[in-house]
Image: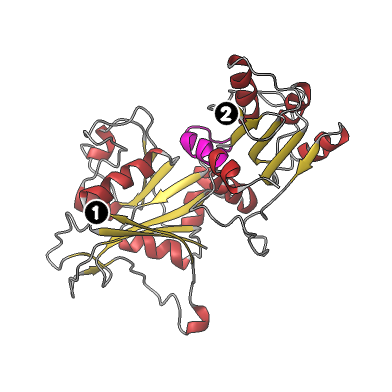
Amino acid sequence: MADLLMFSEANALGHSVAGSTSPNPPVGCVLYDSTGQRVIGRGATEPAGGAHAEVVAIRDALHNGESTVDARAVVTLEPCNHTGRTGPCSQALIDAGITRVDFLFSDPNPVAVGGADHLREHGIDVHGPYLPLPYCDETRSSFQWLPQFSVEPWLVSTVMKRPHVTLKLASTIDGFVAASDNTSKWITSEQARRVVHEDRRHRDAIIVGTGTVKADNPRLTARGEDGTPYPQQPLRVIMGQRSIPEDSHIYDAPGRALHIRSHDVKEVLADLRSRGIVDVLVEGGPRLTGAFLKAGIADAIQLYQAPAFLLAGYRNVECDANLASTLDDIQRFTPRSVSTLGSDILLSLSH
């Protein structure tokens, strides 16, 4: 069985390219020598059309002067078994002389499935999957030790046939995002805001409502600590019927912006999926957050909480109808991690 450290490194490699690989998954792969003790190669999925993680890791090992014969591959997703813009990863591992493969998740894509069986047919010692696919009603194993797996959004998108959705909320302890006079900058700390920018750069798209654009005129870019936008930017999506001024910051910032004139959450997500969007971050406002919860579509929540009370003002979630009339209707989430960001707390939850 692969140990925690092995999959931690592979997962970190996948996270490093998240937001740049869609519609392909951000997979990480680590190659070990025949003893399983020494890393000889590392790889992560290249942008669409480029090499997959296993091939990148094999190339890295060869570049390092290492032999891949009798090596062991630890990868976050079952190696694919189809030829698209690149060849099948399972065959690349076979050709490289790999003798053992450990993988976290099975590939739910019917086009690419079968890599593990193909490897076994060629005498390779295959271990996995170690974890069930999302939304398959199976209990997580002892590998529930990471805040999020790099391939998780892609898995959810593939299984549910819609983009993976994370709701981002920033509020006081009593759940307010703005005071009664509409002032809202800044409830959370600068350190928390830096984490938000880092999160944005690894998403395919950010969604906000027309009300947020009109009230705050945000740029919604992913920026470094010095305020410089990252070269790669998520698609900025405005959801709602109201028109937005053409000189809004959301239009003149680096990257692309898209206004989808609909209040239907499922319709908007279907539109985004048709554009190859896999992972979205919903940044509000409160009515938009409520719309996603009312539709029952929230795979993860990032709750940034400031150690403060407002007592009155605008809450972080609003909805026209009651989301739950009794406790039997409550929407519960599972804590994945808790972090301290300066004076604030970040609580990461999954459905």
Q: Regarding mark 2 in the picture, which secondary structure is present there? A: strand
Query: Which residues fall within the magenta stretch?
Result: 10-25
Coordinates of residue 169 in the picture (x, y in percent): 33, 59
Residue 237 or 2: which is nearer the viewer?
Answer: 2
Task: Report the number of numbered marks.
Answer: 2
- Ranked by sequence position, the earlier of labels 2 and 1 is 2
Q: Is residue 121 left or right of residue 314?
A: right
Specify the amino acid type for callout 2. Arg
Crowding around mark 1 (Cα neighbors within 10 Å: few <14, some 14 to 19, many 20+) is few
Coordinates of residue 164 in the picture (x, y in percent): 52, 50
User: For residue 235, what is the image quadrant?
Assistant: top left
Coordinates of residue 259 in the picture (x, y in percent): 37, 43
User: For residue 246, what is the image quadrant?
Assistant: top left
Q: Is residue 306 above or below residue 203?
A: below
Specify the amino acid type for callout 1. Gly
Residue 71 or 330: which is nearer the viewer?
Answer: 71
Residue occupying image coordinates x 33% and y 69%: 318
Q: Residue 342 got which mark?
A: 1
Q: Residue furthest left?
A: 181
Q: Please report contact status of discs 2 and 1: CB closer than 8 Å, yes or no.
A: no
Residue 317 is one of the magenta-drawn residues: no
Q: Is residue 65 left or right of residue 283?
A: right
Is residue 275 in sight in this rendering? no
Q: Is residue 301 above or below residue 92?
A: below
Residue occupying image coordinates x 41% and y 49%: 281
Is residue 290 in sight in this rendering? yes
Coordinates of residue 116 in the picture (x, y in percent): 78, 39
Q: Residue 42 got which mark?
A: 2
Residue 40 or 156: which is nearer the viewer?
Answer: 40
Q: Regarding mark 1 in the picture, which secondary structure is present there? A: loop
Q: Is residue 96 left or right of residue 200?
A: right
